[in-house]
Image (tube, helix red, strand yellow):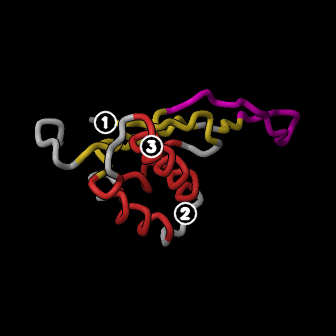
Amino acid sequence: MRAHATARHIRQSPYKVRRVLDLVRGMQVEDARDVLDFTNRRAATTIRKVLDSAVANAEHNLALDTDELYVAEAYANEGPTLKRYRPRARGRATKIRKRTSHVTIVVANENDDEEKI
C-alpha cells in the first residue's frame, strides 16, 4: 500500500529542491526526518512538512503502521514560472524567471516486496 502527499507552487526552483530529495529517497521515515532536521537548506523544511503529511495520510487513510514506512518515491516537478523584468543600462530590460516547484513524496510499507523499487 502506498500513500502520497503533494505540495504545489513552492517558490523555489526544482533543481534546489531535488538536491534535498536525493538525500531522503529510499530511507526509512524516521531516518529521513532526522536527515531533514539537520539539513542546512531552505527546501528541507518544506520537504519535512510534505513527508509528515504523507505519513499522516498513510496512517489515517490506509491504516498503515508508521514504523514500517519508507520513502518509496520523492520527486520535484517544475511548476509555473513567474516572469519579471529588471531594468538595465541604455533603456533595456532583462527577464527574471522566478521558478516554482511541485513536490511529491510517496511512502510505502516496507513489508510489501512487490511494490519496493
In terms of secondary structure, where does tag 3 sit? Answer: helix
Q: Residue at the left extreme?
A: 114
Residue 54 magenta: no
* Residue 94 among magenta residues: yes
Q: Kindly identify the residue that appears in the image at 41 percent across and 52 percent down.
A: 21
| Residue farthest toward the bottom in the current orientation of the protein | 38
Q: Residue at point 41% right, 44% down? A: 59
The residue under label 3 is: 54
Distance from disc 1 to disc 2, alpha carbons, whole Å, reads 27 Å
Residue 114 appears at what percent x and percent y?
A: 11, 36
Check residue 90 in the rendering and tell me which mark sits there, or answer none: none
Please indicate whether residue 107 sits to the left or right of residue 18 in the image: left
Residue 41 is labelled as: 2
Q: Amino acid under label 2?
A: Arg
Mark 1 and mark 3: Cα distance apart in space: 9 Å
Q: Point out the tag, 1 or 3, that comes first from the N-terminus.
A: 1
58 or 22, nearer to the observer: 58
Is residue 113 in sight in this rendering? yes
Of the 4 image quadrants, the one containing the C terminus is: top left
Q: Magenta span covers which residues?
A: 78-95
> Which quadrant would the N terminus be assigned to in this image?
top left
- The residue where tag 1 is placed is 2
Q: Which residue: 88% across, 34% down?
A: 91
Badge 2 crowding class, 10 Å Cα cut-off, few under 14, some 14 to 19, many 20 or more, is few
Nearer mark to the viewer, of 1 and 2: 1
